[in-house]
Image: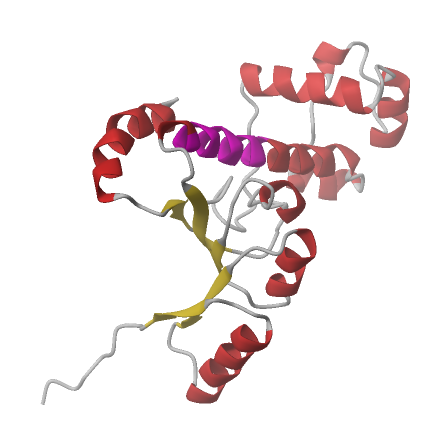
Amino acid sequence: TSYQNALDQWMPKLRRWRPFMCDLGDEMSYGVFTSPLDFDFSPEGLAMFRKWLRQRYKDDLGKLNAEWQRDFKTWDDVMPDTGSEAQTRGVFSGWALHRLYSTVLFANFWNTVSTRARQLDPGLRISASGTPNSHPYNGYDYEKLMPVVDSLIAYTNNGLAELIASFKKAPLMSWVGYGSPEMKVWKEIWDNAFNGHFGVGFYCEMTMLNPS
């Protein structure tokens, strides 16, 4: 809601400048990037998660109990393991589905904000910057996210560019630099070119100089 309120406040003012694209944000993440932070365990969050599980398991609590190796009596008792709990028990079903559900929430957030931005400025293109490789704790599932955006300015290492292109042929630009050795930067530039990117973003780390 706060994002939508901000859009309602600022988009009419920005339209005078005729922006051709709106960036949802830089280095967004459902959690704290790849830090093993398990949430949301709020009553509201758990209620929504359990509703999603009931649809996934077709209201078969016994099947869930069998897969999770639990004995929940009712759907209101269902509680996913944290990462550490799953490691201790050696059963990752509940934890994995909680992480998978986070990708649904993250994609819904992208879609809600993008939809409102397009309502306020019809024809506006939507992008996001600093998007990383998918990880259980960052909420990124590009199969869900790519239908929402028109382009990305991504961190395209480890095959991410090819992954993104497999879901949508959208304009893509990659960030390079970050104190990398010269030959690595050149390799990343050529990788961008061969993958059909429309540009390259250079990030220059702060250079420390000897004051003398």
Principal secondary structure, stretch drawn in magenta? helix
Count of residue discs:
0
Q: Nearer the viewer, residue 91 or 151?
A: 151
Q: Is residue 108 above or below residue 29?
A: above
The percent coordinates of residue 118 (x first, y second) are: 42, 33
Q: Quadrant of residue 120?
A: top left
Q: Nearer the viewer, residue 183 or 165?
A: 165
Instruction: Judge left or right: residue 68 versus residue 142.
Output: right
Residue drawn at x 52%, y 68% is 197
Magenta range is 105-118
Question: In the picture shown, does residue 77 fall above or below 36?
Answer: above
Left or right of residue 100, residue 3 in this image: left
Which quadrant of the figure contains the N terminus? top left
Percent across and percent down for residue 84 are 65, 41
Query: Does residue 162 lie above or below 135 as drawn?
Result: below
Q: Is residue 107 magenta?
A: yes
| Residue 2 screen position, x and y as percent | 35, 25
